Each structure stands twice: as C-alpha cells, then as structure tokens.
Image (cartoon, coloured by chain):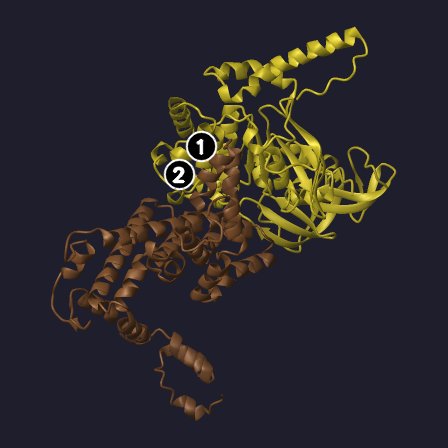
Amino acid sequence: MDRPSAESASPAADRLRKGFASGLRFLKSFPADHNLRPATADSIVAGMATFAETRSALCVEGVCKSFGEVQVLTDIGFEVSSGEFVTLLGPSGCGKTTLLRILAGLELADRGRVMLDGREMTGIPANRRPVNTVFQNYALFPHLSVRENIAFGLRSRRFSESAVAERVGVALQILQMESLVGRYPHQLSGGQKQRVALARALVNEPELLLLDEPMSALDAKLRAEVQIELRRLQRRLGKTFILVTHDQDEAMTVSDRVLVMSDGRIVQSGTPAEVYERPVSRFVAEFLGSANLISGSRVNGHVETIHGPLSVSGSPGWSRGTLAIRPERIRVCSRRPGMNGVSARVREVIYRGDHMDLFVEPGALRVRTAPRADLRAGATIWLALEPEYLVPLSD
Amino acid sequence: MIESPEQRGESPIPEHGSGGGARRRGGGVSRLLIWYGELTTQRRLSLRGVAFILVPMAWLVGFLILPSAALVAVGFAERGAYGEIRWSFTLENFRRLLGFGLFDWSADYLWILGRSVWVALVTTVFAVVVSYPLAFFIASRPPRRRYLWLALVVIPFCTNMVIRTYAWMLLFSQHMPFARLAHLLGLIRAETSLYPSVWAVYVGMVSSFLPFATLPLYTSVERLDWSIVEAAEDLYASKRRIFFQAILPQTFPGLTVAVILTFIPAMGVFVVPDMLGGAKTMLVGNLIQQQFGASRDWPFGAAVSLALMVLTLAGLFWLRRRGEGAEWV
C-alpha cells in the first residue's frame, strides 16, 4: 500500500521516492493480479523465486489481540521466508489458532502488522487475501460434491469453466482423489475429507497456506502417514505453509522451523533440532518431549548440583538456575566416565520394546537407553551427563 | 420402601443365573426398574412393547383414523332435503367442487381453492422472509437474552386467534394511525378502514403463523456451522456468495420445516379471512366452515375437506421428494 507522501525535502529525494514507488509497483504487479494469473504462472513464480529468497514471504510485526479482558496475543513478531514450512506449536489456549486466523484475515489484530510479499495485509478481509486455510474440522461445504468443494475458490474468482476443470483435475491428481469427485463430504472418511480440504485450498495457488490442526481428527497411524505426505507435498509445491498444532511430534516431522508459543507469546523459534536440543526455558524443554531438569548454582566454571559439580559447555547466564538434559542423551556406563559422571541406583525399569526407561536415584533422573538385560531395579550404574547436552535454561 | 427378605424371596422376577445376587439387594423402586429394564425374551419384550403403544394406538384410531374414514364416507354421500346425510355413493360433491353446478359450469369453487393456495403461499413467503433475519437477530443475542426474544415471538401466540384478529381489526379501523397513514400516502380514501382487504388478511395471517416459521429457522440458525461460512470467506466468496453457498444451504432443514408448518395451517385458516377479508376473499377454510355451518351440507363440506387434504399432502410429498434429492440434509 502506498503511504501518503511526505512533503518533499529536496528534488533528489523526490526522484528517489518516485523511482522507488514505480519499482515497487512493478514488483507488486505480479502477485496483485492474483485473480488473473496467466497460464504461465509457474514461469513467473520461478522468476520471482530468486527475488523472494532475499525477502520474507510473510512478515508479522507487533501483533496484539485481546478478547475482552483476555490478552490472547502479545507482541507477536516473526518472519517466514518463501517456501518455508513453519509450525506454530503450543498447548491449547496459547493463542496459536488466533494468530493463524489473523494471518487468514478471519480475525483482525488490535495492533501490529501483517505483510505478505511486502504488501500490507493487516486490514484486508479474508476473501481478498491470497491466503487459504485448511480448517480444523475441514469445514467442507456439505451440499457440494468433492469436485465443487475444490472448485469453490476458483468459481468465487470467476475462473472460466475450462480453467476450473483443469485446475481441479490437477489438484485431484496430486492428492490422488480422482475416484472421489462425485462424492459428498458425508460420504468421505476423515483422511479423505482432509485431502479434499487440502485440495480446496491448494487449487487456488495461495501464496501462503495455513493449516489449523489439520490432523487432529485422524487416528494416530494415519496421522503419521499424512504428516510425511504433507511434508513431501509442501516440498514438491514449494509453497509457504504455516501449520498450527499442539502435537510436538507433528511439528518435528513436518516443519523447517518451529515457533513455540506459550501464553500468547512466541517463546522460542528455530529448527526442530534447535528447539528440541537447545530449549530456552522450562516450558519449551518440557513441552517438547521429556526433559530432566536439574537445578544448581554456578560455581567457577561448574554448576553445583545434587549430582555433584557438572561442567556445562558455554556459561549459563545465571548464578542459580536450571539445567535440562534429554533422557536419551544420558549415557549409561559401566565404569566411571571421564566427565560429568554421576553414580546412581536404578529404582525402576520400564521396558518399551525399542528402548528402556530407567528411573534412577538420587534426583529422580529419567534415562532412556537401548534395552539391556543387566539393568534391573537396584543395580548401581554410572551415568554420563555430557556437557554439550546439558542445556542451561533461562528460568 | 423396605421389604423383608421373605417378600424378596417371592420375587416375581425369574432368576437368571449370576445376575440374581445383585438384584436381590434392591428396594421396591429399583425392583420396578429392574423389571422394566430387564431384557428377558424377545417374545416378552414385544408383548410389553405392544402394551406400551396400545394407548397411543387407541388414541390414533379414535381421533384420527375413524374421523378420517368418516370424512371419506361423508364426502361420497348426498345431502338430504333437510340437510341430513343420505348414505349413498356419489361423485356429485367433487363434480360440484370442480364447477359442474346445477346450472352451468362455473369456476367459483376452483377459484376459492386456487386463492387459498395463493394466499397460503404468500403468507408462507412473508412469514419466512420476516423470520429469516429475525432468527439471525435472536441467535446473535447473548444466550440469556435469546430466550427473552423467543418469548416475545411466542407470547402473542398464546392469545386466542380470534382475539388477535379483533386486535388487528381495531388497529386497522378508520381512526387508527395505520389507516390515517395510508390515507396520507394516498392509498385509501378518507374515513375508510384498512379492512376488509386482502392485505389485512395477509397481515393477520403472517402475524398468526410467524412463530411457526421463526422457531424452526431459529434452531437452524443457532446450530449454524460458522466455520463453513469462514471457509467460504477464505475461498474468496463475495458476501452474496457466502450467503447463498454457505449460510442458506445450512438452513434448508429449518426452512423446510418453517414452510410446512406455516403453509398447512395457512391453507385451512378461516377466522382471519372471515374477519379481515370480507366476502371477496373467501378461502377454502371459510367454504368448509360454511358447509358444516350455515349451509348444512356436510357431504360437500367433507368433499372440500378431502380435496384440501389431498392438495396439502401432495405438496408435502413434493417437498419431501425434493428433500431426498439433497442427500446431505
């Protein structure tokens, strides 16, 4: 959106601004005629890809939202680059769905801005945003067949009958649903509904696809398959996806980057490995998988804990605080390890097939290890809490 | 009620293996419940089922099936010279309804039938058109206030229809503001009342049947799945398209019920057109009432009633067949 031009200070600045404005108009012209994208859309998108790399596809700044007294989102800001798969991960009630709705235009932010490909989107209603959503319960039109459900967005934008047929055909093919075209939503299984909802959104070639817990209605086994399928689809199409979920496995499986949310704030952002291996806070450590939290105080280069002094790679930013270590990162040794060795007694052993969970004393540590016959309750063992896996938390 | 072990011993309940121990503990009420809920044999259950539906069955036979049969019988009978029913089998009543009178063919009765269908249709359309936004209005109120609004819709309904129609007569009389306003707008001459007229009939009928349309529509609107509306919005639909593709189809079930519940009573009504419509707007309801009343021609009245029933049922079947076409309802 053009800003109202300020009083020109000098002719040079004026020229500069004009030049900038025309350049911007040129760039904007591609996504702006979204409705009339020519048949060679792919070539244009490919051409723009180099341009998109230098800039984020989505940029959210200082978004706040409250419902009545309740502050749902507080100063949310993040950027998503084009073709990235980002997950908003958090427990229910953390505001992730509200954030998604603000991106979709179904909800308006009280404050802050949403920019899409450099264009201001903040006040633009959902039906004029180049963004599509896969809703949590899929929200398929019950009175329309699969074909008409998928064609809905194209018909809204008055695509020609042949263009509708072609695009729907491609979408059906990509999602392998050709045999379902004539069915109605109530005749579909959960997985099929989900595919229709996905096709209905993707057929519009959105610049940004939003997915609101799209797998919560599927059973566990199907969910795991669909996650991988979704990941591959996103890679193939090269579109920007934003997924909302409370399932950390799902977030890990599908995303390039995870934004962990809690109480209306983004508490950590990073690749799945980063947020899992280097959690910044107790919340992140415990929400993503399980973690052993060891409190201690910093003495010289060590952290003094109930397990004795432990060396930590990098210095914690506190004098008293918490260290986190993942159960599977604790190594069980037969002899005293060279560094950060902890002597412990096995209190309980839980056999889980592919691994074993040990609960050890003192300190109620939880250790995950490969199944071993010699580890029984009462056994005394050595544990190695290696420095690179001991993560100092901020709280 | 506490019973002694001896009494319990004589329990009429046949003991079925292991369940017996638990059953012995109950008092009278729970024993009754056990008897009621115990799944014994298929035969016993079906006998019990028959016993349960006997009363409603008797009711239906006594007050629906027998009177309907009587109506059919009388519809094919003849009127005696003094208004008595002469039992015979004749199609004369139906011939007369179709216009083959004593003298010449006249479409009077067919006109009445046609007008009744028309008036009922217009009433239904008006009632639904008024109810639709009203239902949205009520459904969008905070829950507590919703019931207040619903009560306001229903309360006039608790008043007798005749009294309500009198109220309209008063409101439409020449010195009341409505008539004066109509005069100012040049719609009527000075010092005339707004009734009898077709419009007065419409107003009276719509007001009478409004709750029949509002309540089913309200339930439909209240259960509306708004995520579908949002999906339409997300898929670039205009306001118009959102309404026709995402909202209207969801309210079809309520709409169908509203139409049925308004149309059927509107077809049979006679009080309102009688009082607000005058002679020119005679409807089938008035015709029937006249036959059973002033004219003392029960056979013809029965025949007209039958025709009305057939017409209404045909309409219902048509509506249902259309409903079956849309499988998703």
Secondary structure under the numbered disc 1 in the rendered image: helix
Instruction: Tell me: residue A55, above or below residue A217.
Output: above
**CA distance for labels 1 and 2:** 9 Å
Q: In terms of depth relative to the viewer, which is nearer, B53 or B179?
A: B179
- Describe residue A80's horizontal placement relative to residue B225 as left or right: right
- Tell me, yes or no, whether dots 1 and 2 are on the same chain: yes
Q: Which residue is mark 2?
A: A144
Viewed as shown, does residue B131 lie left or right of A10? left
Q: Whole-percent x and y of residue A395?
A: 78, 43
Q: Which mark is residue A152?
A: 1
**Which residue is rendered at x = 73% and y = 7% of the image?**
A15
Q: Position of residue A113 (x, y in %)?
A: 69, 30
Q: Chain of mark 2?
A: A
- The answer to which of B59 and A179 lies nearer the viewer is B59
Nearer to me, B227 or A296 = B227
Task: Report whether residue B255 is seen.
Answer: yes
Do tag 1 and tag 2 residues touch (Cβ < 8 Å)? yes
* Element type where label 2 sits in the image: loop
Q: Residues within 10 Å of mark 1 (few under 14, many from 20)?
A: many
Colour that chain A carries in the picture: yellow
Residue A78 seen in the figure: no
Q: Chain of mark 1?
A: A
Which mark is on residue A194? none
**Number of numbered callouts drawn:** 2
Q: Colour of chain B?
A: brown
Q: Residue at x 42, y 91 (%)?
A: B7
- Percent from the top left, x then y, of residue A118? 65, 22
